[in-house]
Image (spheres, grey):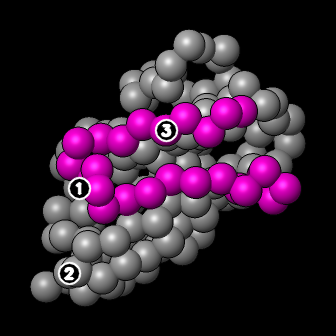
Amino acid sequence: QVQLVESGGGLVQAGGSLRLSCAASGRTFSNYIRGWFRQAPGKEREFVAAIRWGGGSTSYADSVKGRFTISRDNAKNTVYLEMNSLKLEDTAVYYCAADRTLRSGVSSWVGDYDYWGQGTQVTVAS
């Protein structure tokens, strides 16, 4: 089993920045893909960004490209989401996830991810 714990959410003004962290424990493998998703009230969970643990290739949703950066710290088994130039529409619960399937690419589909964190709230205020 893999346990994922997010931290770093909070309230920030539009245009500001936040950094989310997701620490993993338990059984993890170098082929895992680690992703961030978010869910706003009344909306479906959507892909934000993902990173291949081995190799470090990344993928981003169009809505966050150029503003968000996903990165990893191998020694700490932690993935980060640096969020800059935050907008009101970035308000959501952000979830960390892990995909254990060996793939050629990085998936953006919720159903491909096997493990999920409990979520952390990000609120962007005007």
Amino acid type, callout 1: Pro
> How far across and down, in percent of the image, does residue 124 sit?
25, 76
- For label 3, count other residues whose C-alpha is less than 10 Å away and answer few (under 14), some (14-19) or many (20+): some
> How far across and down, in percent of the image, does residue 74 sit?
78, 51
Q: Residue at x 65, y 17 (%)?
A: 101
Q: Is residue 92 visible?
A: no
> How far across and down, in percent of the image, does residue 109 sit?
40, 25
C-alpha gap between disc 2 and disc 3: 25 Å
Q: Which marked residue is nearer to the observer: mark 1 or mark 3?
A: 3
Would you say 124 lies left or right of 4 here? Answer: left
Please tell me the numbered disc located at residue 41: 1
> How far across and down, in percent of the image, does residue 86 sit?
26, 71
Amino acid type, callout 3: Thr
Q: Is residue 22 visible?
A: yes
Q: Is residue 10 above or below residue 52?
A: below
Please tell me the numbered disc located at residue 58: 3
- Is residue 71 a member of the stretch shown in magenta? yes
Task: Classify residue 94 by image quadrant.
Answer: bottom left
- For label 1, count other residues whose C-alpha is less than 10 Å away and answer few (under 14), some (14-19) or many (20+): few
Quarter holding the N terminus is top right
N-terminal label among 1 and 2:
2
Residue underneath mark 2: 14
Q: Is residue 35 above or below residue 95?
A: above
The magenta region covers 54-78
Amino acid type, callout 2: Ala
Q: What secondary structure is marked by label 2? A: loop
Q: Nearer the viewer, residue 26 or 75?
A: 75
